[in-house]
Image (spheres, rainbow, N blue to C red):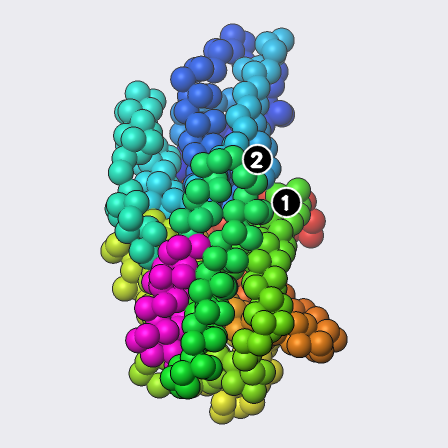
Amino acid sequence: MLSRMRDWRAAHQSELTPEGLDQDDDPDMPDARVINLVLRVGELMLASGEGTEAVSEAMLSLSVAFELPRSEVSVTFTTISLSTHPGRDQHPITGERVVRRRTLDYFRVNELHTLVEQAALGLLEVEDATARFKQIQRARMPYPNWGIVVGFGLIASSAGLMMGGGLIVASVAFLATVLGDRAAALLARRGVAEFYQMVGASVMAATIGALLLWINYEMDLGLQAGAVITGNIMALLPGRPLVSSLQDGVSGSYVSANARLLETFFTLGAIVSGVGVVAYTAVRLGVAMDLENLPSAGTSLGPLVLIGAAGIAMTFAISLAVPPRLLPAIGLMGVMIWSIYAGLRSVLEVPPVLATVVGAVAVGVVGHWLARRTRRPVLPYLIPSIAPLLPGSILYRGLIEITQGTAVSGLLSLVEAVTVGLALGAGVNLGGELMRAFQRGGLAGAGMRSRPAARRTRGGY
């Protein structure tokens, strides 16, 4: 069926490009319903967390499917525009929509991809596609709101378990992260900027973690209490904008790439600010934060560590409203990326960054293969699967080093954390590029022979 779509596009190529402007004797005006549908689909996809290139491809696919002549699509971080030219002396028609509120919702992203594919294959008329779009807008997510919150807390619990914290630490990490999330939600309802919402969530969770550290020291409980703070950091780390920023940069959407990367660093700044203030205060009040005993899973491949890796990936997916039927595959990919990382480090003594890249490339290849095989978007597979390698423990170590007066070592640890994060994003995207180099076509013919960013450079020769 995809080949039928490409054949249709080839047969109408002159009508879809500027070269065919003067060939229509009596051009028809574009259907306003189609323009509105294309813009609204693109807006909801972008607002729900889809990458810029995928949004552009989906909009172009709808434009081709419903015969909008000579369409051009422009997608940035917050703005979507569509221009279509009827032909001859008619004026071009341009529409634009602005994304003012973004909510990560991969359930809707998945449903919108299905809608676009069905329309591209000629299975939906304009009226049917519009009705289906409205259903997607009104549809309930696969998890209740409290389930999303619980999933967010379970990310920290799984991280605490993975780092040897045990049941008590995992339970406190869950409580701390949920309370931090609720504090951020309260600030959001009062109109406080998102940066300070993240600071509030970090402060709340880190304060509970520091309190457990103090109790552990005073009562000599032998708990790995620092895993509470590390788990909260991992729950808050911006994996999605990091991967999307590099994905946008690779595809040639440099404006969106810069905006997403700036969003990533603002989020990191909020986490560092919140946790750093609490850690500094705790050290000054005499709370023991021993650099020799910081929480880390190291390179272990023990059962609890692997269960924790799978748990982090699956609960991260729940917090992003990924459909439940994808969770088993995501859990296995979380175990896979950790096993590759730990195996390379322990057996071959590969540096952490290189081991991270190799694991991320493997996840990128498998994720893109699964997405193509199941005809689903790829980000719901990729973003949760890299979560076990997010540099939460490295960030925590850097902040403790800074608060204890070793600023140079602390800054180097923070740089290492950023490097590991970039290695994750770069590795995932490299895996996707390896898959793309051998695939043919896409919804709008965006395979190895017709990627716009590639054809602007050497790919056009």
Q: Position of residue 214 (x, y in %)?
A: 47, 75
Q: Is residue 290 above or below residue 141?
A: below
Tell me, for residue 75, which label it has, or none.
none
Residue 78: numbered disc = 2
Secondary structure state at the residue bearing disc 2? loop
Few, some or many residues within 10 Å of mark 1 (<14, 14–19, 20+)? some
Q: Is residue 319 above or below residue 27?
A: below
Q: Residue at x 56, y 40 (%)?
A: 193
Residue 168 sits inside the magenta stretch: yes
Q: Is residue 33 left or right of residue 206?
A: left
| Residue for point 44% across, 15% down | 32
Query: How far across and how far down the image is residue 230, in percent?
Result: 48, 70
Segment colored magenta: 153-180
Q: Nearer the viewer, residue 299 or 437?
A: 299
Magenta part, dominant SS: helix
Residue that badge 1 annotates: 259
Where does residue 304 sit, x and y in percent of width and height? Answer: 32, 80
The quarter of the picture where residue 128 lies is: top left
> For the point 39% across and 55% down, which residue is it?
179
* Residue situated in front as seen by the camera: 458 or 126: 126
Name the image quarter holding the N terminus: top left
C-beta proximity under 8 Å, tags 2 and 1: yes
